[in-house]
Amino acid sequence: MKTTASAALLDHRFLLLEALGRGGMGCVYRAFDRVDQRRVALKVLLSRESSGPGHPLSTEYEVWSRLRHPNIVQAYELGRAMHGPLSPGTPYLVLEDFSGLPVQRALLPGRIGTSHLEELGRKILHALGHVHAAGLVHRDLKPANVLVGTARQGPGRIKLTDFGLATNVGRAGRRGYVSGSLPFVAPESVMGRPVDGRTDLYGLGILLYLLAAGRMPVPSRDPSEILRWHLEGPPADPRKFNPLVSQRLSRFIQKLTARSPDERPDSCAEALLLLGGRRPSSSRPRPDHSGAADRAALRLALDAVRLGARRRIDLPPGRPASVSVLREAAVLSQVHGLLFFRLRPGRRRGRSNLGRLVLRLLMMRGPEVRTLIRKHGLHRGLPLGLLGGLPVWDRLRAETEEESTDPSVLGAVAGGVARFLLGSCQRQSMVLVVEKGSLTDPLARRVTELLVEETRKPRADSSGKGGLLLVAPLRVRPAPISRW
Protein backbone atom coordinates (compact mmCIF):
# COMPACT_ATOMS: atom_id res chain seq x y z
CA MET A 1 0.00 0.00 0.00
CA LYS A 2 1.31 3.44 -0.93
CA THR A 3 2.21 5.73 1.94
CA THR A 4 2.47 9.18 0.35
CA ALA A 5 0.01 11.79 1.55
CA SER A 6 -1.28 12.40 -1.97
CA ALA A 7 -2.20 8.71 -2.26
CA ALA A 8 -4.52 8.74 0.76
CA LEU A 9 -7.62 9.48 -1.37
CA LEU A 10 -9.41 6.26 -2.34
CA ASP A 11 -11.46 6.49 -5.54
CA HIS A 12 -11.24 10.30 -5.24
CA ARG A 13 -13.93 9.97 -2.58
CA PHE A 14 -12.63 8.47 0.68
CA LEU A 15 -9.85 10.32 2.48
CA LEU A 16 -8.06 7.72 4.61
CA LEU A 17 -7.39 9.11 8.08
CA GLU A 18 -5.97 6.26 10.16
CA ALA A 19 -5.68 2.50 10.44
CA LEU A 20 -7.93 1.09 13.16
CA GLY A 21 -6.97 -2.56 13.07
CA ARG A 22 -5.49 -5.35 11.01
CA GLY A 23 -6.40 -9.01 10.67
CA GLY A 24 -5.29 -12.03 8.72
CA MET A 25 -7.10 -11.05 5.51
CA GLY A 26 -7.54 -7.31 5.72
CA CYS A 27 -7.44 -4.00 7.51
CA VAL A 28 -9.94 -1.45 8.83
CA TYR A 29 -9.41 2.27 8.24
CA ARG A 30 -11.20 5.37 9.43
CA ALA A 31 -11.95 7.64 6.47
CA PHE A 32 -13.93 10.71 5.46
CA ASP A 33 -16.55 10.28 2.73
CA ARG A 34 -16.44 13.41 0.54
CA VAL A 35 -19.77 12.59 -1.13
CA ASP A 36 -21.96 11.96 1.91
CA GLN A 37 -19.93 14.31 4.14
CA ARG A 38 -19.41 11.90 7.02
CA ARG A 39 -16.75 9.79 8.67
CA VAL A 40 -16.88 6.10 7.86
CA ALA A 41 -14.92 2.93 8.51
CA LEU A 42 -13.52 1.02 5.54
CA LYS A 43 -12.97 -2.72 5.87
CA VAL A 44 -10.46 -3.60 3.17
CA LEU A 45 -9.81 -7.12 1.88
CA LEU A 46 -6.05 -7.35 1.27
CA SER A 47 -5.83 -11.04 0.39
CA ARG A 48 -5.44 -11.19 -3.40
CA GLU A 49 -6.39 -14.86 -3.46
CA SER A 50 -9.85 -13.93 -2.14
CA SER A 51 -10.68 -10.91 -4.29
CA GLY A 52 -12.64 -12.64 -7.08
CA PRO A 53 -16.39 -12.19 -7.74
CA GLY A 54 -17.31 -14.36 -4.75
CA HIS A 55 -14.88 -12.74 -2.33
CA PRO A 56 -15.63 -12.91 1.42
CA LEU A 57 -16.67 -9.25 1.70
CA SER A 58 -19.50 -9.75 -0.82
CA THR A 59 -20.90 -12.56 1.32
CA GLU A 60 -20.41 -10.52 4.47
CA TYR A 61 -22.15 -7.48 2.98
CA GLU A 62 -25.09 -9.59 1.82
CA VAL A 63 -25.53 -10.80 5.41
CA TRP A 64 -24.75 -7.50 7.17
CA SER A 65 -27.12 -5.48 5.00
CA ARG A 66 -30.11 -7.37 6.48
CA LEU A 67 -29.50 -5.74 9.87
CA ARG A 68 -30.63 -2.35 11.17
CA HIS A 69 -30.29 -1.93 14.93
CA PRO A 70 -28.89 0.79 17.21
CA ASN A 71 -26.52 -1.74 18.80
CA ILE A 72 -25.13 -3.05 15.49
CA VAL A 73 -22.64 -1.23 13.27
CA GLN A 74 -24.38 -0.43 9.97
CA ALA A 75 -23.02 -1.57 6.59
CA TYR A 76 -23.52 1.19 4.00
CA GLU A 77 -22.15 -0.15 0.72
CA LEU A 78 -19.68 -2.43 -1.01
CA GLY A 79 -17.06 -1.19 -3.45
CA ARG A 80 -13.91 -2.04 -5.38
CA ALA A 81 -10.87 0.21 -5.54
CA MET A 82 -10.28 2.00 -8.83
CA HIS A 83 -7.86 4.79 -7.86
CA GLY A 84 -5.67 5.58 -4.89
CA PRO A 85 -3.65 3.66 -2.32
CA LEU A 86 -5.21 0.22 -2.84
CA SER A 87 -4.50 -2.12 -5.72
CA PRO A 88 -7.14 -1.82 -8.48
CA GLY A 89 -9.99 -4.24 -7.86
CA THR A 90 -9.41 -4.50 -4.10
CA PRO A 91 -12.82 -5.00 -2.40
CA TYR A 92 -13.83 -2.82 0.54
CA LEU A 93 -16.86 -2.40 2.79
CA VAL A 94 -18.09 1.06 3.79
CA LEU A 95 -19.29 0.91 7.40
CA GLU A 96 -20.67 3.20 10.05
CA ASP A 97 -17.85 4.85 11.98
CA PHE A 98 -18.32 4.21 15.68
CA SER A 99 -15.65 5.70 17.91
CA GLY A 100 -15.75 2.94 20.49
CA LEU A 101 -13.09 0.59 21.77
CA PRO A 102 -13.08 -3.21 21.95
CA VAL A 103 -14.78 -4.14 25.19
CA GLN A 104 -11.66 -5.48 26.92
CA ARG A 105 -9.94 -2.12 26.29
CA ALA A 106 -12.92 0.07 27.14
CA LEU A 107 -13.54 -1.75 30.44
CA LEU A 108 -11.01 -3.24 32.84
CA PRO A 109 -11.59 -7.02 33.07
CA GLY A 110 -11.92 -8.24 36.65
CA ARG A 111 -12.71 -4.78 38.02
CA ILE A 112 -16.15 -4.12 36.58
CA GLY A 113 -19.12 -3.87 38.90
CA THR A 114 -21.81 -6.51 38.60
CA SER A 115 -24.51 -3.98 37.67
CA HIS A 116 -22.37 -2.63 34.83
CA LEU A 117 -21.62 -6.13 33.59
CA GLU A 118 -25.32 -6.99 33.57
CA GLU A 119 -26.11 -3.78 31.72
CA LEU A 120 -23.49 -4.65 29.12
CA GLY A 121 -24.90 -8.15 28.79
CA ARG A 122 -28.43 -6.82 28.22
CA LYS A 123 -27.25 -4.46 25.46
CA ILE A 124 -25.42 -7.28 23.69
CA LEU A 125 -28.48 -9.53 24.01
CA HIS A 126 -30.68 -6.91 22.34
CA ALA A 127 -28.25 -6.78 19.41
CA LEU A 128 -28.00 -10.57 19.18
CA GLY A 129 -31.78 -10.86 19.33
CA HIS A 130 -32.00 -8.75 16.17
CA VAL A 131 -29.37 -10.90 14.46
CA HIS A 132 -31.18 -14.12 15.35
CA ALA A 133 -34.55 -12.72 14.26
CA ALA A 134 -33.00 -12.23 10.82
CA GLY A 135 -32.23 -15.96 10.71
CA LEU A 136 -28.51 -15.47 11.33
CA VAL A 137 -25.88 -16.61 13.81
CA HIS A 138 -22.91 -14.27 14.38
CA ARG A 139 -20.48 -17.11 15.31
CA ASP A 140 -17.63 -14.78 16.31
CA LEU A 141 -18.67 -13.08 19.54
CA LYS A 142 -15.32 -12.05 21.00
CA PRO A 143 -14.05 -8.86 22.70
CA ALA A 144 -12.73 -7.30 19.47
CA ASN A 145 -16.21 -7.53 17.91
CA VAL A 146 -18.03 -5.76 20.76
CA LEU A 147 -17.29 -2.03 20.64
CA VAL A 148 -18.04 0.14 23.68
CA GLY A 149 -18.38 3.91 23.65
CA THR A 150 -17.22 6.21 26.43
CA ALA A 151 -19.49 7.06 29.35
CA ARG A 152 -19.05 8.74 32.73
CA GLN A 153 -20.21 5.66 34.57
CA GLY A 154 -20.40 2.08 33.39
CA PRO A 155 -20.40 0.94 29.77
CA GLY A 156 -21.47 3.47 27.17
CA ARG A 157 -23.24 2.65 23.96
CA ILE A 158 -22.27 -0.73 22.52
CA LYS A 159 -22.10 -1.84 18.90
CA LEU A 160 -21.75 -5.37 17.60
CA THR A 161 -19.52 -5.57 14.52
CA ASP A 162 -17.80 -7.94 12.06
CA PHE A 163 -20.17 -10.40 10.37
CA GLY A 164 -17.49 -12.14 8.34
CA LEU A 165 -18.31 -15.53 9.90
CA ALA A 166 -22.08 -15.06 10.22
CA THR A 167 -24.18 -17.88 8.81
CA ASN A 168 -27.79 -18.95 8.56
CA VAL A 169 -29.45 -20.65 11.51
CA GLY A 170 -29.32 -24.44 11.27
CA ARG A 171 -26.17 -24.64 9.18
CA ALA A 172 -23.67 -27.30 10.21
CA GLY A 173 -19.92 -27.04 9.83
CA ARG A 174 -17.22 -29.65 9.48
CA ARG A 175 -16.35 -31.63 12.59
CA GLY A 176 -13.09 -30.37 14.07
CA TYR A 177 -13.06 -27.27 11.88
CA VAL A 178 -13.51 -24.19 14.06
CA SER A 179 -15.45 -21.24 12.59
CA GLY A 180 -14.80 -18.48 15.11
CA SER A 181 -12.23 -17.54 17.71
CA LEU A 182 -11.15 -20.69 19.54
CA PRO A 183 -11.44 -19.39 23.15
CA PHE A 184 -15.09 -18.36 22.51
CA VAL A 185 -16.33 -21.11 20.20
CA ALA A 186 -19.29 -23.27 21.25
CA PRO A 187 -19.00 -27.07 21.57
CA GLU A 188 -21.55 -27.70 18.81
CA SER A 189 -19.38 -25.71 16.39
CA VAL A 190 -16.38 -27.87 17.22
CA MET A 191 -18.46 -31.01 16.74
CA GLY A 192 -19.74 -29.86 13.34
CA ARG A 193 -23.35 -29.80 14.48
CA PRO A 194 -26.02 -27.27 13.35
CA VAL A 195 -25.75 -23.87 15.02
CA ASP A 196 -28.42 -21.44 16.14
CA GLY A 197 -28.80 -18.45 18.47
CA ARG A 198 -27.71 -20.52 21.47
CA THR A 199 -24.26 -20.76 19.86
CA ASP A 200 -23.88 -16.98 20.22
CA LEU A 201 -25.16 -17.15 23.80
CA TYR A 202 -22.27 -19.48 24.61
CA GLY A 203 -19.79 -16.95 23.23
CA LEU A 204 -21.46 -14.21 25.27
CA GLY A 205 -21.09 -16.34 28.40
CA ILE A 206 -17.34 -16.73 27.83
CA LEU A 207 -17.03 -13.00 27.17
CA LEU A 208 -18.86 -12.10 30.38
CA TYR A 209 -16.70 -14.60 32.29
CA LEU A 210 -13.54 -12.87 31.02
CA LEU A 211 -14.84 -9.44 32.05
CA ALA A 212 -16.07 -10.67 35.45
CA ALA A 213 -13.13 -12.87 36.46
CA GLY A 214 -10.36 -10.96 34.72
CA ARG A 215 -9.11 -14.12 33.01
CA MET A 216 -10.30 -16.85 30.65
CA PRO A 217 -11.85 -20.08 31.99
CA VAL A 218 -8.79 -21.98 30.80
CA PRO A 219 -5.52 -20.01 31.11
CA SER A 220 -3.60 -22.13 28.61
CA ARG A 221 -3.06 -21.02 25.02
CA ASP A 222 -2.67 -24.60 23.87
CA PRO A 223 -5.52 -25.20 21.33
CA SER A 224 -5.96 -28.81 22.42
CA GLU A 225 -6.48 -27.79 26.07
CA ILE A 226 -8.92 -25.05 25.07
CA LEU A 227 -10.94 -27.48 22.96
CA ARG A 228 -10.92 -30.06 25.75
CA TRP A 229 -12.31 -27.47 28.19
CA HIS A 230 -15.10 -26.50 25.76
CA LEU A 231 -16.14 -30.12 25.43
CA GLU A 232 -15.75 -31.44 28.99
CA GLY A 233 -14.38 -28.76 31.28
CA PRO A 234 -15.82 -27.72 34.67
CA PRO A 235 -18.56 -25.04 34.95
CA ALA A 236 -17.42 -21.48 34.24
CA ASP A 237 -17.89 -19.88 37.68
CA PRO A 238 -16.25 -16.41 37.79
CA ARG A 239 -16.70 -16.21 41.60
CA LYS A 240 -13.72 -18.56 42.02
CA PHE A 241 -11.46 -15.68 40.97
CA ASN A 242 -13.65 -12.70 41.81
CA PRO A 243 -15.91 -13.20 44.84
CA LEU A 244 -17.48 -9.76 44.27
CA VAL A 245 -19.41 -11.14 41.30
CA SER A 246 -23.06 -11.59 42.24
CA GLN A 247 -24.66 -15.01 42.53
CA ARG A 248 -27.18 -14.10 39.81
CA LEU A 249 -24.51 -13.12 37.28
CA SER A 250 -22.44 -16.20 38.10
CA ARG A 251 -25.43 -18.51 37.57
CA PHE A 252 -26.27 -16.66 34.37
CA ILE A 253 -22.76 -17.15 32.96
CA GLN A 254 -22.78 -20.83 33.88
CA LYS A 255 -26.14 -21.31 32.17
CA LEU A 256 -24.94 -19.59 28.98
CA THR A 257 -21.82 -21.76 28.89
CA ALA A 258 -23.58 -25.08 29.39
CA ARG A 259 -22.02 -27.67 27.09
CA SER A 260 -25.38 -28.77 25.68
CA PRO A 261 -27.36 -26.09 23.78
CA ASP A 262 -30.55 -27.53 25.31
CA GLU A 263 -29.34 -26.46 28.76
CA ARG A 264 -28.85 -22.84 27.70
CA PRO A 265 -31.64 -20.26 27.35
CA ASP A 266 -33.75 -20.91 24.26
CA SER A 267 -33.42 -17.33 23.00
CA CYS A 268 -32.06 -13.88 23.75
CA ALA A 269 -35.49 -12.92 25.06
CA GLU A 270 -35.33 -15.70 27.68
CA ALA A 271 -31.75 -14.76 28.55
CA LEU A 272 -32.80 -11.14 29.07
CA LEU A 273 -35.44 -12.21 31.56
CA LEU A 274 -32.83 -14.22 33.47
CA LEU A 275 -30.65 -11.11 33.62
CA GLY A 276 -33.45 -8.90 34.90
CA GLY A 277 -34.17 -7.22 31.58
CA ARG A 278 -37.23 -6.90 29.39
CA ARG A 279 -38.06 -8.73 26.23
CA PRO A 280 -36.95 -6.79 23.11
CA SER A 281 -39.90 -4.89 21.67
CA SER A 282 -38.80 -3.63 18.25
CA SER A 283 -35.67 -5.52 17.31
CA ARG A 284 -37.08 -7.69 14.55
CA PRO A 285 -35.75 -7.01 11.04
CA ARG A 286 -38.18 -5.83 8.41
CA PRO A 287 -39.96 -8.82 6.85
CA ASP A 288 -39.53 -9.58 3.15
CA HIS A 289 -42.82 -8.82 1.42
CA SER A 290 -41.57 -9.24 -2.16
CA GLY A 291 -43.05 -12.07 -4.18
CA ALA A 292 -41.16 -14.72 -6.13
CA ALA A 293 -42.15 -13.13 -9.46
CA ASP A 294 -40.86 -9.70 -8.40
CA ARG A 295 -37.54 -11.14 -7.21
CA ALA A 296 -37.16 -13.18 -10.39
CA ALA A 297 -37.83 -10.12 -12.58
CA LEU A 298 -35.23 -8.14 -10.63
CA ARG A 299 -32.57 -10.84 -10.90
CA LEU A 300 -33.17 -11.30 -14.64
CA ALA A 301 -32.88 -7.56 -15.17
CA LEU A 302 -29.68 -7.38 -13.13
CA ASP A 303 -28.17 -10.28 -15.09
CA ALA A 304 -28.95 -8.48 -18.36
CA VAL A 305 -27.47 -5.21 -17.09
CA ARG A 306 -24.26 -6.98 -16.08
CA LEU A 307 -23.94 -8.01 -19.74
CA GLY A 308 -24.43 -4.43 -20.94
CA ALA A 309 -28.19 -4.19 -21.45
CA ARG A 310 -30.34 -1.21 -20.53
CA ARG A 311 -33.53 -2.13 -18.78
CA ARG A 312 -36.36 -0.47 -16.93
CA ILE A 313 -38.56 -2.15 -14.35
CA ASP A 314 -41.40 -0.91 -12.17
CA LEU A 315 -41.68 -1.49 -8.46
CA PRO A 316 -44.48 -3.79 -7.30
CA PRO A 317 -47.55 -2.01 -5.91
CA GLY A 318 -47.68 -1.45 -2.16
CA ARG A 319 -44.98 0.02 0.01
CA PRO A 320 -43.88 -3.18 1.84
CA ALA A 321 -43.31 -5.07 -1.43
CA SER A 322 -41.52 -2.14 -3.10
CA VAL A 323 -39.25 -1.63 -0.08
CA SER A 324 -38.30 -5.33 -0.14
CA VAL A 325 -37.43 -5.21 -3.85
CA LEU A 326 -35.39 -2.04 -3.40
CA ARG A 327 -33.47 -3.57 -0.52
CA GLU A 328 -32.65 -6.63 -2.62
CA ALA A 329 -31.69 -4.46 -5.61
CA ALA A 330 -29.28 -2.45 -3.44
CA VAL A 331 -27.55 -5.55 -2.09
CA LEU A 332 -27.38 -7.61 -5.28
CA SER A 333 -26.18 -4.74 -7.46
CA GLN A 334 -23.23 -4.04 -5.17
CA VAL A 335 -22.42 -7.72 -4.68
CA HIS A 336 -22.18 -8.06 -8.47
CA GLY A 337 -20.10 -4.91 -8.92
CA LEU A 338 -22.81 -2.54 -10.18
CA LEU A 339 -23.07 1.06 -9.02
CA PHE A 340 -26.28 1.63 -7.05
CA PHE A 341 -27.91 4.99 -6.45
CA ARG A 342 -31.31 6.26 -5.34
CA LEU A 343 -32.64 9.52 -6.73
CA ARG A 344 -34.44 11.05 -3.73
CA PRO A 345 -36.20 14.31 -2.93
CA GLY A 346 -33.82 17.02 -1.71
CA ARG A 347 -34.01 19.12 1.42
CA ARG A 348 -35.55 22.00 -0.49
CA ARG A 349 -38.93 21.57 -2.10
CA GLY A 350 -38.64 20.92 -5.81
CA ARG A 351 -35.05 19.68 -5.55
CA SER A 352 -33.45 16.23 -5.62
CA ASN A 353 -30.07 14.68 -4.88
CA LEU A 354 -29.23 14.34 -8.58
CA GLY A 355 -26.17 16.52 -8.04
CA ARG A 356 -24.85 14.08 -5.44
CA LEU A 357 -24.99 11.27 -7.99
CA VAL A 358 -23.12 13.38 -10.52
CA LEU A 359 -20.53 14.35 -7.89
CA ARG A 360 -20.00 10.73 -6.88
CA LEU A 361 -19.48 9.66 -10.48
CA LEU A 362 -17.12 12.56 -11.16
CA MET A 363 -14.96 11.55 -8.21
CA MET A 364 -14.41 8.19 -9.88
CA ARG A 365 -12.99 9.81 -13.02
CA GLY A 366 -9.90 11.49 -11.59
CA PRO A 367 -8.01 13.71 -14.06
CA GLU A 368 -10.89 13.63 -16.56
CA VAL A 369 -13.11 15.71 -14.26
CA ARG A 370 -12.42 19.15 -15.75
CA THR A 371 -12.97 17.91 -19.30
CA LEU A 372 -16.18 16.08 -18.39
CA ILE A 373 -17.71 19.08 -16.62
CA ARG A 374 -16.99 21.31 -19.61
CA LYS A 375 -17.99 18.71 -22.22
CA HIS A 376 -21.42 18.01 -20.71
CA GLY A 377 -22.07 21.47 -19.26
CA LEU A 378 -22.50 20.00 -15.79
CA HIS A 379 -21.67 23.30 -14.11
CA ARG A 380 -24.68 25.02 -15.70
CA GLY A 381 -27.43 23.32 -13.73
CA LEU A 382 -25.54 21.90 -10.76
CA PRO A 383 -23.55 23.69 -8.02
CA LEU A 384 -20.23 22.07 -9.00
CA GLY A 385 -16.79 23.57 -8.69
CA LEU A 386 -13.18 22.46 -8.84
CA LEU A 387 -10.52 22.66 -6.17
CA GLY A 388 -7.08 21.44 -7.11
CA GLY A 389 -8.57 19.47 -9.98
CA LEU A 390 -11.08 17.66 -7.73
CA PRO A 391 -14.84 18.33 -7.84
CA VAL A 392 -16.39 20.04 -4.84
CA TRP A 393 -19.96 20.82 -3.87
CA ASP A 394 -20.86 24.50 -3.55
CA ARG A 395 -23.42 24.47 -0.74
CA LEU A 396 -24.14 28.20 -0.97
CA ARG A 397 -24.80 27.99 -4.67
CA ALA A 398 -26.97 24.91 -4.11
CA GLU A 399 -29.32 27.04 -2.01
CA THR A 400 -29.65 29.79 -4.60
CA GLU A 401 -29.11 28.16 -8.04
CA GLU A 402 -32.19 28.49 -10.25
CA GLU A 403 -30.63 28.23 -13.73
CA SER A 404 -31.57 24.59 -14.21
CA THR A 405 -35.30 25.37 -13.88
CA ASP A 406 -35.24 27.97 -16.67
CA PRO A 407 -37.14 26.38 -19.59
CA SER A 408 -34.70 27.92 -22.05
CA VAL A 409 -31.77 25.96 -20.62
CA LEU A 410 -33.48 22.99 -18.92
CA GLY A 411 -33.39 20.77 -22.02
CA ALA A 412 -29.72 21.38 -22.71
CA VAL A 413 -28.70 20.89 -19.08
CA ALA A 414 -30.74 17.69 -18.72
CA GLY A 415 -29.30 16.35 -21.98
CA GLY A 416 -25.77 16.95 -20.75
CA VAL A 417 -26.44 15.21 -17.42
CA ALA A 418 -28.10 12.25 -19.17
CA ARG A 419 -25.18 11.87 -21.58
CA PHE A 420 -22.76 11.99 -18.66
CA LEU A 421 -24.70 9.27 -16.79
CA LEU A 422 -24.79 7.02 -19.86
CA GLY A 423 -21.09 7.60 -20.43
CA SER A 424 -20.38 6.67 -16.83
CA CYS A 425 -22.25 3.40 -17.38
CA GLN A 426 -19.63 2.49 -19.96
CA ARG A 427 -17.11 2.28 -17.12
CA GLN A 428 -19.33 0.68 -14.47
CA SER A 429 -22.88 -0.51 -15.09
CA MET A 430 -25.44 1.22 -12.92
CA VAL A 431 -28.72 0.65 -11.10
CA LEU A 432 -30.64 3.90 -10.67
CA VAL A 433 -33.78 3.97 -8.52
CA VAL A 434 -35.95 7.03 -9.14
CA GLU A 435 -38.19 7.80 -6.18
CA LYS A 436 -41.46 9.45 -7.12
CA GLY A 437 -40.86 12.45 -4.87
CA SER A 438 -37.64 13.33 -6.70
CA LEU A 439 -39.59 14.04 -9.89
CA THR A 440 -40.82 17.36 -8.48
CA ASP A 441 -37.32 18.55 -9.39
CA PRO A 442 -37.65 19.69 -13.04
CA LEU A 443 -34.06 18.73 -13.86
CA ALA A 444 -34.34 15.27 -12.28
CA ARG A 445 -37.64 14.64 -14.07
CA ARG A 446 -36.25 15.66 -17.44
CA VAL A 447 -33.13 13.51 -17.00
CA THR A 448 -35.31 10.54 -15.98
CA GLU A 449 -37.47 10.98 -19.09
CA LEU A 450 -34.38 10.89 -21.30
CA LEU A 451 -33.06 7.76 -19.57
CA VAL A 452 -36.45 6.04 -19.92
CA GLU A 453 -36.31 6.69 -23.66
CA GLU A 454 -32.79 5.26 -23.78
CA THR A 455 -33.92 1.98 -22.17
CA ARG A 456 -36.48 1.56 -24.99
CA LYS A 457 -33.84 1.44 -27.69
CA PRO A 458 -32.81 -2.03 -28.88
CA ARG A 459 -29.32 -2.85 -27.66
CA ALA A 460 -27.12 -5.93 -27.66
CA ASP A 461 -26.72 -7.54 -24.23
CA SER A 462 -23.30 -9.08 -24.74
CA SER A 463 -20.97 -6.08 -24.69
CA GLY A 464 -20.45 -6.22 -20.92
CA LYS A 465 -20.36 -2.40 -20.78
CA GLY A 466 -22.90 0.40 -20.57
CA GLY A 467 -25.49 -1.51 -18.59
CA LEU A 468 -28.26 0.49 -16.91
CA LEU A 469 -31.20 -0.68 -14.81
CA LEU A 470 -33.69 2.13 -14.30
CA VAL A 471 -36.25 1.54 -11.56
CA ALA A 472 -38.67 4.37 -12.32
CA PRO A 473 -42.27 5.26 -11.47
CA LEU A 474 -44.95 4.32 -13.99
CA ARG A 475 -46.04 7.89 -14.76
CA VAL A 476 -42.89 9.16 -16.44
CA ARG A 477 -43.57 10.78 -19.82
CA PRO A 478 -41.06 9.55 -22.42
CA ALA A 479 -39.14 12.42 -24.03
CA PRO A 480 -38.38 12.68 -27.78
CA ILE A 481 -34.75 11.75 -28.17
CA SER A 482 -34.26 14.48 -30.76
CA ARG A 483 -34.60 17.15 -28.05
CA TRP A 484 -31.29 16.21 -26.44
Image (tube, helix red, strand yellow):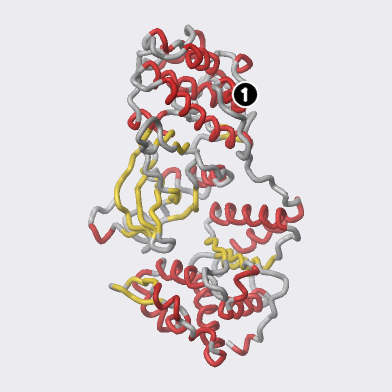
Q: Is residue 316 visible?
A: yes
Picture layout, residue 393 above or below residue 107:
below
Q: Pick out the residue farthest to the bottom.
A: 408
The residue at which mark 1 appears reads as 270
Q: Residues within 10 Å of mark 1 (few under 14, many from 20)?
A: some
Picture layout, residue 67 above or below residue 273:
below
Q: Is residue 172 visible?
A: no
Q: Pick out the residue farthest to the front.
A: 152
Label 1 residue SS: helix
Side (left or right) of 23 relative to 411 = left
- State the residue in front, 303 or 291: 291
Tell me residue 287's x, y (percent).
Answer: 68, 45
Picture layout, residue 24 above or below residue 333:
above
The quadrant of the picture occupied by the C terminus is: bottom right
Q: Residue at x 66, y 83 (%)?
A: 479
Q: Pick out the residue farthest to the left.
A: 4
Q: Residue at x 70, y 80 (%)?
A: 477
Side (left or right) of 199 relative to 363 = right
Quarter where residue 378 is shown: bottom left
Q: Amino acid at mark 1?
A: Glu
Q: Residue at x 49, y 46 (%)?
A: 74
Tell me residue 144's x, y (percent).
Answer: 39, 32
Q: Total label count?
A: 1
Q: Residue at x 46, y 55 (%)?
A: 79
Tell me residue 209's x, y (percent).
Answer: 43, 18
Tell me residue 257's x, y (percent).
Answer: 52, 16
Side (left or right) of 130 relative to 7 = right
- State the residue in front, 475 or 23: 475
